[in-house]
Amino acid sequence: MAYEPTIRVLHLPCEGAPRGLHVANTAQALGKLIGGYLEVFQIPGITRDPMNDPIGLCDADGYVKDPPRDENVYGMILTHSPIAGDIVIVRADPEGDFVSLTDDDIRRLRAHLRLILIQVG
C-alpha cells in the first residue's frame, strides 16, 4: 500500500468526546496526540475479520508519569484492560505502516463505543 503523509484517525481523549482527525503520519505527530511514546494494542471485535480490525495507540509510559495520567474509560471498553491517557485509533496495512481509518471503521467504532457506554451507564 502507498504511504499516506496524513491519516484519518479517531482520537479518544480522557476528557471529552471522541473526534475524527487528520494528522501527519509520523510517530512524532501521533505521540503528541497521546502525550508520549507510542504503544500499540489490539482492538478485537470491530470487524468480522480479526486480522482486519483497527488498532489502538496509547502512551507507553502513561502509568509511570508523574503525575500519573488519568485512566481512559474507552480503554476498558475496547480492551478490557486499563489504559492511562488519550487513545488514538488507526489502521495498519500488511507491512505494519499506519493508514487511514475508513468511513466504515469510524461508523463501527462509534457505534461500538456508544453501545457499551449505554450498557454501562
Image (cartoon, grey):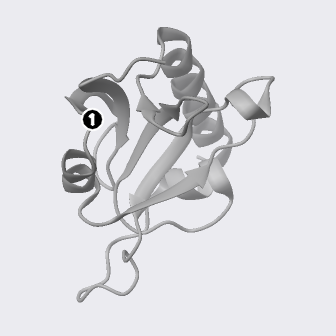
The count of marks equals 1
User: What SS does tag 1 mark?
Assistant: loop
Please determine whether, in this image, residue 72 is positioned above or below residue 89.
below
Residue under pointer 1: 25
Q: Is residue 15 left or right of residue 48?
A: left
The amino acid at mark 1 is Asn
Q: Is residue 111 left or right of residue 97?
A: right
Q: Nearer the viewer, residue 28 or 111?
A: 28
Residue 106, image x, y percentages: 48, 20
Please tell me how crowded label 1 is: few (under 14), some (14-19), or many (20+) other residues with Cα within 10 Å: some
Give me the residue at 43% from left, 68% from top.
Answer: 71
Percent coordinates x, y for residue 119 in the rendering? 68, 41
Q: Nearer the viewer, residue 13 or 92?
A: 92
In the image, is residue 37 above or below residue 100?
below
Measured from the top left, where is residue 51 in percent x and y?
74, 33
Please indicate whether residue 74 sits to the left or right of residue 30 in the image.
Answer: right
Q: Residue furthest top?
A: 103
Residue drawn where x is 53% and y is 16% of the image: 107
Q: Is 21 rendered above or below residue 62?
A: above
